[in-house]
Image (cartoon, rainbow, N blue to C red):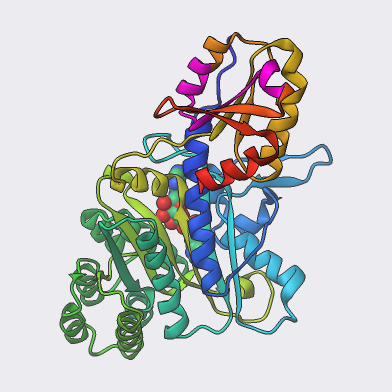
């Protein structure tokens, strides 16, 4: 067949889906213990939702199209803008803060490589309203807690505050329009390019020097002191740095100390307004950023009132890879525990009946439906790694019994049909 999967997309088979579902369920459980409730938004939205803050340039990275009525639509590249839209449409009157989480696929027109896809999944949380260092710390703590629950140990949380750099740009009278350009260059992490851009937009050389120093500030909490020296003449930046310091106290109270202060974090998306953070996992190579988030004010940009919010999203696919790398011995997941094997055609219906009884009692069961020979059934049961095979034979049935075969020991036992379901439940406990 000539038709292939579109570039940057993947198919997922049974094992992988099971693994993904388990990770999804763990995250759900953690998010819900912090009082977050699940929401879902459409896969496509008005293109304007994503260009309003970021400008038309972003369309290069977005899958967008016109529908049959000429509406400009886009497959969502992320979920924070859709959640902010949902809030404006549905929840403006609800008491805040609102705690929501989501799981869904996103689409970005990027050059595919390991860990970077055109369709990928995000699982994240948004805390709408009630911005405070406490809520910001809770968001970061929840992301870290999720990783712990998944058994991921080797990760680093990098935290910064965009207010520090913005304070410098503000004092240097940089026009608002160049903020995003400068942030985008900082996000790339290339100092040479940053210097060039700062020269081009004619930022005061003293401010440029401070900015170059700031973006290189990455380290333990001590660098806060060093930073406060660098920015001491800028009240806005000092305020932002103090805010960051306070957040770190709270994060430590939540029990997380494996963070680094990183003032060079700019985040690729330009709706952030204050605290920002990224989580990096070891072993994933270039695509090691498994999560990103921060504080933003999209709702006001979309025409709502000023509601400062904070949130984050896991790149779910990278997270799955990371869990896989951290996992001990890869456990093989069985699809079923029991195989019901009719010994002849005449007992097929009875075998189906028994299998159905098992399933109703929650036992994962396979039953032969295609009249395989017993030897083949046992082979298949072995391949599926089932624990027990139930042999349904004519002679046993006449006595109201079936044979239970333990696939590990090979032992067989004749059991009353009446009690075989309970026996299986007890054995599989
Ligand atoms: P983001 O950093 O653009 O933030 O994406 C979040 C995560 O999605 C990244 O850390 C990364 O793991 C993953 N990711 C991004 N692009 C790809 C891709 N092409 N393939 C695979 N994984 C990818 C956001 O999207 C924000 N909405 C996060 C947020 C929520 N901020 C506040 N609330």
Residue 148 in percent (x, y) is at: 35, 62
Q: Position of residue 92 (x, y in %)?
A: 72, 78
- How many numbered marks does the figure carry? 0
| Image position of 89 (left or right of 104) | right
* Closer to us: 412 or 299: 412
> Residue 258 versus residue 394: which sits nearer the camera?
394
Q: Nearer the viewer, residue 324 or 107?
A: 324
Classify residue 350 by image quadrant: top right
Question: Residue 244, relative to residue 113: is it above or below?
Answer: below
Chain part drawn in magenta: 378-397
Q: Residue at x 16, y 80 (%)?
A: 222
- What residue is shown at x 32% (from left), y 70% (from top)? 159
Q: Is residue 88 left or right of residue 384?
A: right
Residue 304, above or below 239: above
**In which quadrant of the rendered image does the N terminus lie?**
top right
Q: Is residue 329 magenta?
A: no
Q: Residue at x 39, y 56 (%)?
A: 150
Q: Position of residue 238 (x, y in %)?
A: 30, 88
Tell me what residue is drawn at x 49 percent, y 30 percent.
386
Q: Is residue 383 magenta?
A: yes
| Towards the viewer: 196 or 190 | 190
Residue 190 visible, this angle = yes
Image position of 234 with respect to 187: above or below: below
Residue 28 in percent (x, y) is at 54, 60
């Amino acid at each position: 067949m000539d038709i292939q999967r579109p570039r940057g997309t993947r198919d997922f088979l049974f094992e992988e889906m099971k693994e993904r579902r388990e990770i999804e369920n763990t995250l759900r459980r953690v998010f819900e213990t912090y009082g977050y409730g699940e929401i879902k938004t459409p896969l496509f939205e008005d293109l304007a939702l994503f260009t309003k803050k970021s400008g038309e340039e972003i369309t290069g990275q977005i899958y967008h199209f016109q529908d049959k009525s000429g509406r400009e639509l886009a497959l969502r590249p992320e979920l924070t803008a859709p959640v902010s839209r949902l809030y404006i449409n549905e929840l403006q009157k609800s008491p805040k803060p609102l705690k929501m989480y989501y799981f869904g696929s996103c689409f970005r027109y990027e050059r595919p490589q390991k860990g970077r896809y055109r369709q990928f999944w995000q699982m994240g949380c948004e805390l709408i309203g009630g911005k405070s260092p406490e809520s910001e710390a809770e968001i970061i703590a929840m992301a870290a807690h999720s990783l712990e629950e998944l058994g991921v140990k080797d990760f680093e949380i990098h935290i910064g505050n965009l207010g520090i750099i913005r304070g410098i740009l503000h004092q240097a009278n940089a026009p608002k329009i160049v903020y995003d350009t400068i942030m985008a260059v900082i996000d790339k992490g290339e100092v040479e390019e940053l210097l060039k851009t700062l020269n081009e937009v004619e930022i005061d050389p003293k401010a440029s020097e401070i900015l170059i120093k700031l973006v290189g500030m990455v380290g333990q909490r001590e660098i806060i002191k060093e930073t406060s020296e660098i920015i001491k003449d800028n009240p806005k930046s000092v305020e932002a740095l103090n805010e960051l310091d306070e957040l770190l106290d709270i994060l430590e109270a939540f029990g997380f100390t494996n963070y680094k202060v990183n003032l060079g974090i700019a985040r690729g998306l330009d709706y952030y307004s204050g605290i920002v953070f990224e989580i990096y996992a070891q072993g994933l190579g270039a695509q090691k950023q498994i999560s990103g988030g921060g504080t933003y004010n999209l709702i006001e940009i979309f025409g709502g009132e000023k509601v400062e919010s904070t949130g984050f999203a896991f790149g779910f696919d990278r997270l799955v890879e990371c869990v896989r790398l951290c996992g001990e011995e890869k456990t093989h997941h069985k699809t079923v525990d029991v195989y019901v094997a009719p010994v002849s055609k005449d007992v097929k219906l009875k075998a189906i009946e028994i299998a159905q009884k098992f399933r109703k009692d929650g036992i994962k069961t396979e039953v032969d439906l295609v009249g395989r020979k017993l030897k083949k059934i046992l082979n298949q049961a072995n391949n599926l790694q089932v624990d027990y095979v139930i042999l349904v034979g004519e002679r046993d049935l006449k006595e109201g019994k079936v044979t239970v075969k333990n696939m590990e020991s090979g032992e067989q036992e004749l059991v009353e049909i009446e009690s075989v379901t309970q026996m299986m439940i007890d054995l599989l406990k």
